[in-house]
Image (spheres, coloured by chain):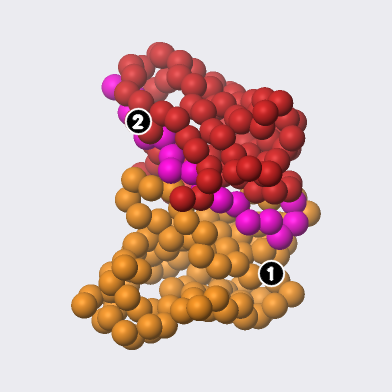
Chain colours: A orange, B red
Amino acid sequence: DQQVKQNSPSLSVQEGRISILNCDYTNSMFDYFLWYKKYPAEGPTFLISISSIKDKNEDGRFTVFLNKSAKHLSLHIVPSQPGDSAVYFCAASDEDAGNMLTFGGGTRLMVKP
Amino acid sequence: DSGVTQTPKHLITATGQRVTLRCSPRSGDLSVYWYQQSLDQGLQFLIQYYNGEERAKGNILERFSAQQFPDLHSELNLSSLELGDSALYFCASSVVSGGADTQYFGPGTRLTVL
């Protein structure tokens, strides 16, 4: 039973445009959400997070939106750059159950020059 | 560089063998987490230690065990290895054990079981 799902395995975007990566979850106990970026043969790199008490968090070119009623979050990257090409994972945790992360399957983002 | 170190980077061994993977957390972090990334399973949580004590267990096989030492480094022991244990093993660390606490990942150890 996948509690965190990223339904798009890949996404291709033109440089300078917006990239929108989506993530859905089923466990209503999740209250902290994170996005990680991963290159092949490297560890996941933390990008941005959001607590369930917020619906938006911004950090430079990266913005995460959380819709609790729909159990959906999205990562917006504006403007997209070729260096953003990587696999993006969303992850979720239930603060009361410890800090273990449940990951989605990842979305491969390709930003074309 | 996340500040989390893992050794070795690569490990090739045979079925039935035992290996130890090592992780040093970021300075000041008390929690260490182990994750496995295999081709068909994605990133899966294995086990968490906080300040030397086991805090949470995920989908960790009985053949696998871990510990966290007084200097806070951690080791993941994998025994009676099978072909299906071939995967990337990541360690992550965070300051505390719960709450909205971000985990930072190491570069991983690639284990190949032949």
Disc 2 marks which residue?
B10
Crowding at dot 2, Cα within 10 Å, few <14 / some 14-19 / many 20+, comes out as few
Question: Identity of the amino acid at label 1?
Answer: Ser
Q: Is residue B30 magenta?
A: no
| Label 2: element kind | strand
Foreground mark, 2 or 1, reads 2
Q: Residue at x 55, y 67 (%)?
A: A48
Query: Where's residue A32, x and y in %?
Result: 67, 64
> Residue B27, located in which quarter of the rendered image?
top right
Which residue in the rendered view is the most extreme toward the right? A96
* Residue A81 appears in the rendering: yes
- Magenta stretch bounds: B98-114
* Residue B56 appears in the rendering: no
Q: Residue at x 41, y 28 (%)?
A: B8
> Residue A11, located in which quarter of the rendered image?
bottom left
Q: Which mark is residue A51?
A: 1
Circle 2 chain: B
Q: Is residue B109 magenta?
A: yes
Query: Where's residue A30, x and y in %?
Result: 68, 62
Query: Where's residue B7, x and y in %?
Result: 45, 30
Vertically, is A8 above or below B24? below
